[in-house]
Image: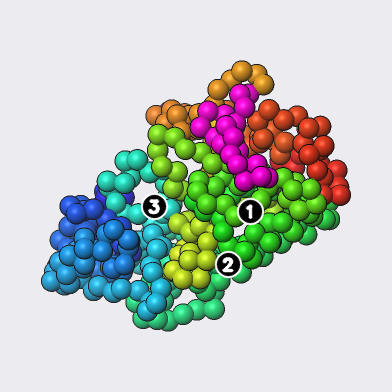
Amino acid sequence: MVNFIRTAAQDPRVLSIKQTLYRTNSDSPIVRTLIEAAGKKEVTVVVELKASFDEATNIRWARSLEDAGVQVFHGVVGLKTHAKVTLVVRQDPDGKIRRYAHLGTGNYNPSTARFYTDLSLLTRDDAITSAVHDTFNYLTAYAEQPHYKPLMVAPVDMARTCIALIDREARNARRGKPGRIIVKINALVDPPVIQALYRASRSGVEIDLIVRGQCALVPGLRGISSRIRVRSIVGRFLEHSRIFYFENGGNPEIYLGSADWMPRNLYERVEVLFPVKDAALRTRVATEILGAYLSDNCKSHLLRSNGTYSRSPAARNGLSVNAQEHLLRVAGSADGAQRVRATRIPEAYESTPGMTASDHAQQGSDGEDVGSTV
């Protein structure tokens, strides 16, 4: 990301740079690069002054940016700006003006990047970059749109759209189509979302939730949530990426972003979830990343219906899977195609290590037979 901003700042064809800053460090190379770019092109930065524990640093950087001629905004009144987005506008050699966007799950902070797990997307997709442009208009000119498709933007439409996607899985399951939801977040405490997940479970949707911290949903309750499994993974790195997988009747949709399913994220902050539109990238996220987390039997803890957590039992075949160590090896591999072939999303019942399909069925079927869906 630092190289992307530095290259954009130095490129004479770049006309403008827009970026959000929620958390950054006291010696941020990104902020210094934006300051250097301000004398050569239009630079706009949305700085969140109320980022917990980083208020003083952000205030200091905001003043430095303003002194350098950067257009500094502080977002929508009453809402924290938690979205991680950057937009670069460039006149390419063919004379056409194009937008390039970077969207991420983590802060533009080189310090935390060393021990947080995060994902990001660099794209020039017209629909996405146009929506990012509209999002910056919302943050800087209060020009709110009814929606920001293909993005989900809180507090405008994110909660409503997430619940609609959950309900779509429920409808598909009732119609005999594959129904599967896999979500990786930091916290799950929003009542409307939890109720939607319960409805989906009762309809036959297999649901795996990887929730690092707070989880108000109760899994494994007969007639309510017997198709829902919840795990927390605590390892060498702080799990920070948010991933949302919806089976969509065999045509999966995946969204990434910085929002948890919490009231503060859905209704009190400006957040962005963005789609992974490229089929190859969707496959990598689904199999290489989510598959690894669902197979982890070293650092994974399972949430039981009584509210306690227990360590994942060892795999029946004796193979130990540490998702974070696996992904470190993947990052060092040059054969991307081999990485994708080597992993997959586990079957629904396999996502609870140590359980067989019959064990899962006996746990409670919400009135219907349990079967694998992916």
Looking at the image, can residue 11 be seen?
no
Tell me, for residue 217, which label it has, or none.
Answer: 1
Callout 2 secondary element = helix
The amino acid beneath tag 2 is: Ala
- Per the image, is 313 magenta? yes
Residue pictured at 69% horizontal, 61% vertical: 196
Give the residue at mark 2: 159
Residue pictured at 80% horizontal, 43% vertical: 364
Which tag, 3 or 1, sits closer to the chain's start?
A: 3
- Viewer-side residue, 372 vs 369: 369
- Viewer-side residue, 8 vs 75: 75
In contact (CB < 8 Å): disc 2 and disc 1: no
Q: CA distance from mark 3 to mark 1?
A: 25 Å
Callout 3 secondary element = loop
Q: Is residue 335 left or right of residue 11?
A: right
Q: Which span is picked out in magenta?
A: 297-315
Give the residue at mark 3: 106
Residue 132 pos. (x, y %): 43, 67
Q: Is residue 237 left or right of residue 247?
A: left
